[in-house]
Image (cartoon, rainbow, N blue to C red):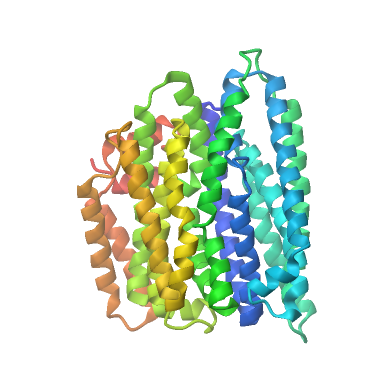
């Protein structure tokens, strides 16, 4: 059985190792690029990737979520011809939509460059950016199909290979250009080459698994529900795209300039690469969602789904606490050190981004629940909030970068509150206990206060983190029944370390 406890346990191992490698390599890549590119080139580079992230959400049309939602159901209850038809249809639609988007962008490069305040010397870089958009989207789609089939070993290996190859090729290029300057064009050419290789590899593995996957002769799959799902999710994604960091980056570049966009993205990516990949709801989403869909559709029991969601939301708060501890006590020094002295006095930005990350991680759990329980219409309605993020950010950007970040924080929390209220009607015990939240807040306060007055940066960071970890062992935020969920999912040994912060 593809979604058995045994395969799930193996998938968790490959998933964790792959995410750790990917997270580490991506962080090295971020710190490397901010040093080797000048401020303007780095600002344009991250603006191009902002366009990638904006269009990735806006143009997904539900095609990214459909594999995670329906592949487990087809494999569990469907037939092989239905499975193959599903994969081929979605893959064809994805490529067709990307060809149209890339063509439109290609013929509007000059207008796009003017809107983004990109100087004439860098206009040609946008052509590489358009090619990069196509390759990245195809790669991510293929990797998602592998993940939905619980082929985590291959999917995570290929995902981790991307930043590793990019770092390696940049280092080789730096040796080659030892007497010259590493340019924006060089960075984009390396990215195009790497993602072209990854597209070939992931597409080939998708073809092999689609061709060879063995399914029993079960009931026919009703494709009508796929189109209804994609219709609702398309609206959700289109609205949500205006609240993504990608769209905000584009607005900052057009109003405050590409250098301010560079600062915004550097801190946001620093938080993402160092913390986001370690957020349980992010790490386990593509792994747990197929499993929960399979179990829920088979038994109709929503209680276990609710308990898993509560546990994910609780675990999300633990890495956020570490981030806030460091940001409060050593934020300015941390940003200055990691940016090679290019960005100063940005500690407040760091702390706000960590809080936003925590809110978005909890929001991803709520979104997952709405998709599992087929509440996609409510998902669409609440996503309308994010559609007004872009115009609100545009209006507040005249007051500076800090006002933009505060606006983002407010919009994310507003959306989460509405979704939580809706889900509580169906899942009455959804959420983290107030007593647990208070205990975690106390742990963060004590840890930050302990390291705040230590002059040595490195010692202060170590003491702050160690104090926080000790406080977790003392307050024990995880209950015994919550830890039992790990064992029931077959991953108790993999996450045995959580026993230290589990109540007896």
Residue at 40%, 79% (x, y): give it. 332
Q: 276 or 414: nearer the eye?
A: 414
Answer whether residue 1 is visible to the viewer in this image.
no
Residue at 24%, 49% (x, y): give it. 436
Q: 300 or 7: nearer the eye?
A: 300
Residue at 55%, 27% (x, y): give it. 3
Q: Is residue 236 left or right of residue 399?
A: right
Q: Position of residue 44 (x, y in %)?
A: 65, 73
Which quarter of the image is occupied by the N terminus? top right
Answer whether residue 344 is visible to the viewer in this image.
yes
Q: Is residue 138 left or right of residue 2?
A: right
Residue at 40%, 56% (x, y): give it. 412
Q: How many marks?
A: 0
Q: 72 or 380: nearer the eye?
A: 380
Tell me where residue 80 sits by quadrant: top right
Q: Position of residue 78 (x, y in %)?
A: 62, 19
Q: Position of residue 177 (x, y in %)?
A: 78, 80
Which quarter of the image is occupied by the C terminus? top left
Q: 454 or 291: nearer the eye?
A: 291
Instruction: Look at the picture and state if 257 lies above or below 238.
Output: below
Q: Position of residue 285 (x, y in %)?
A: 49, 42
């Amino acid at each position: 059985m593809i979604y058995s406890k045994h395969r799930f346990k193996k998938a968790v191992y490959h998933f964790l190792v792959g995410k750790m490698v990917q997270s580490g390599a991506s962080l090295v890549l971020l710190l490397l690029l901010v040093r080797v590119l000048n401020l303007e080139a780095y600002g344009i580079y991250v603006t191009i990737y902002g366009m990638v992230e904006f269009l990735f959400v806006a143009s997904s049309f539900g095609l990214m979520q459909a594999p995670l939602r329906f592949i487990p159901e087809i494999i569990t209850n469907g037939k092989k011809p239905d499975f193959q038809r599903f994969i081929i249809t979605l893959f064809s639609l994805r490529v067709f939509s990307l060809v149209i988007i890339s063509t439109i962008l290609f013929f509007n490069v000059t207008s796009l460059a003017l809107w983004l305040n990109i100087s004439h010397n860098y206009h040609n870089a946008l052509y590489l950016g358009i090619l990069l958009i196509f390759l990245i989207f195809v790669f991510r789609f293929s990797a998602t199909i592998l993940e939905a089939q619980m082929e985590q070993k291959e999917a995570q290996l290929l995902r981790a290979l991307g930043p590793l190859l990019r770092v390696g090729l940049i280092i080789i290029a730096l040796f080659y250009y030892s007497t010259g300057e590493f340019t924006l064009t060089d960075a984009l050419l390396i990215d195009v080459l790497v993602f072209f290789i990854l597209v070939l590899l992931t597409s080939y593995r998708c073809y092999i698994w689609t061709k060879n996957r063995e399914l029993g002769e079960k009931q026919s799959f009703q494709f009508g529900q796929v189109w209804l799902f994609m219709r609702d999710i398309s609206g959700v994604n289109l609205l949500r795209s205006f609240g993504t960091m990608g769209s905000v980056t584009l607005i900052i570049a057009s109003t405050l300039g590409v250098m301010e966009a560079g600062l915004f993205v550097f801190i946001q990516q620093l938080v993402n690469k160092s913390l986001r990949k370690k957020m349980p709801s992010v790490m386990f989403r593509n792994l747990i969602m197929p499993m929960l869909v399979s179990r829920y559709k088979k038994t109709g029991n929503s209680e276990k789904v609710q308990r898993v969601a509560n546990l994910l939301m609780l675990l999300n708060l633990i890495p956020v606490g570490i981030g806030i501890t460091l940001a409060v006590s050593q934020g300015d020094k941390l940003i200055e050190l990691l940016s090679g002295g290019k960005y100063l006095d940005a500690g407040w930005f760091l702390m706000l981004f960590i809080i936003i990350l925590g809110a978005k991680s909890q929001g991803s759990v709520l979104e997952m629940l709405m998709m599992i329980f087929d509440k996609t219409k409510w998902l669409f309605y609440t996503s309308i909030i994010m559609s007004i993020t872009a115009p609100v950010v545009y209006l507040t950007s005249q007051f500076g970068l800090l006002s933009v970040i505060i606006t983002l924080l407010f919009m994310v929390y507003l959306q989460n509150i509405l979704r939580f209220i809706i889900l509580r009607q169906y899942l009455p015990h959804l959420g983290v206990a107030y007593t647990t939240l208070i205990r975690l807040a106390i742990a963060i306060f004590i840890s930050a206060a302990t390291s705040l007055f230590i002059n040595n940066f490195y010692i202060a960071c170590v003491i702050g983190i160690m104090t926080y970890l000790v406080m977790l062992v003392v307050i024990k935020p995880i209950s015994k029944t919550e830890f039992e969920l790990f064992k029931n999912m077959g991953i108790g040994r993999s996450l045995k370390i959580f026993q230290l912060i589990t109540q007896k």
